[in-house]
Amino acid sequence: MTDLEPYVLSPERQLTESEKKRVWQKPHSHKVSEEEQRISQEIKRNWNRGEMKIANILLEGDAGSGKTQLAKALSANFGLPYTKVTCFADMDKSDIIGAILPVISSDRLEQLEPEEQSILKALYESDGFQSATDILMNALGMTQEQAQLKIKQLLKLAAEHSDGEAVEYRFYPSEIVRAYQEGYLLEIQEPNVIRDAAVLMALNSALELDGSINLPTEVIRRHPDFIAVITTNRSYAGARPLNEALRDRVQHSEKMDLPTKEVMMERTMSKTGYQDEQMLSILADTIMILDKTARANAIKGVAGMRSLFYWADAVASGASAKDSLYHKVIYKITTDAEEIKILEEALGKQDLIKALDNVAIDVKKNEKITTP
């Protein structure tokens, strides 16, 4: 067993070549967090304990706290293909289960616009094992949201072109169903934005450890390797408190916050290659103060690890730390003048604006000294 395999859950399982490509590969910049280690150990420990099995995880935190990165890391640790579904307010049951699409005749297909023709042909030529969303994403380069919208449009379009004739129908499972049936690690992003209670009930049913999903063509049972990782954003616009029934089906939860300053610096060094610890210390302090201030003043934006990565990368390329603070961090949080003033005052109280100026002066002095 190698260092990368201590948590593999089903070592005897043979993945297809396509499935192997879906298992996330950790980049060199990846740093194992306490949360990753804790979840991996808990799932491995309980994997064969029947009703004590842990297979539904909740990661709840602000944007940039590393929820998706952690979900992908679990895919690597467990040796499971990773896939995701991004929830949206108007999801319906077809987004949970899949879509039944009519197969219209070749003559009527030729009457459609070229884009619709290419989409339907891609669906008709598929092997039936992929979800319709996945087919459109792979064949036509669509985003998940674009593909889901297009499927709904195709349902209406195909019905209009059937002209009352007897029509053959074909079922295309959703990405949720495919992961559920084939035993993937599925990240379910932001289910708390879903408005339709019936959709949430369908999702709740799917997350039962011994659950099943009633499809139009068959009843499928949950694959023993299926793991659901629910990621939700505490301050996401339009989000509601996570459905109680859904939360009840979770066996392990993590509250995702900004990591410690030391971890923030270490991850930034790994991610960007920038090694100036004095500067990184000030950048990390700034991010932490902005995050705390935004929360305390109900400012909707977030200062997180993503902002730190891009800010540090800009500074490493020669940008002014003070000037790029606005373009890489503050304006991502807010562009409201009063809110910006609140953030600036918080940084001023901690002398961080002055610190950015001072460290920039030190850098320039060092550059002059080392220049022949």
Image (cartoon, rainbow, N blue to C red):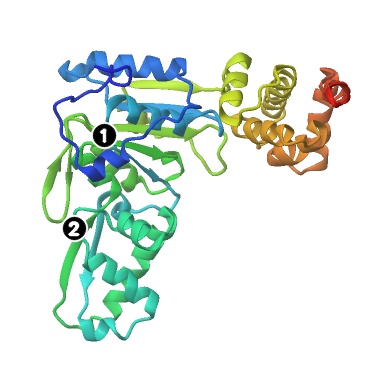
Q: Residue 207: which numbered mark, if any?
A: 1
Q: Please rate how many residues cluster around mark 1, counting C-alpha atoms within 10 Å: few if below 14, some from 14 to 19, many from 20.
A: many
Query: Considering only order in the chain, which callout, 1 or 2, is on the residue closer to the N terminus?
Result: 2
Could you tell me the amino acid type at mark 2?
Gly
Q: Please rate how many residues cluster around mark 2, counting C-alpha atoms within 10 Å: few if below 14, some from 14 to 19, many from 20.
A: some
Q: Residue at x 22, y 62 (%)?
A: 126
Q: Residue at x 82, y 38 (%)?
A: 338
Q: Residue at x 19, y 42 (%)?
A: 16
Whether residue 342 is visible, yes or no, is no
Could you tell me the amino acid type at mark 1?
Leu
Q: Residue 290, percent across and down?
A: 72, 27
Name the residue nearer the viewer: 299 or 150: 150
Tell me the SS state at disc 1: loop
Number of numbered labels in the structure image: 2
- Is label 2 or label 1 in front? 2
Q: Residue 342, percent across and down?
A: 81, 30
Tell me the SS state at disc 2: loop
Image quadrant occupied by the N terminus: top left
Q: Residue 128: which numbered mark, if any?
A: 2
Q: Residue 355, percent across and down?
A: 84, 20
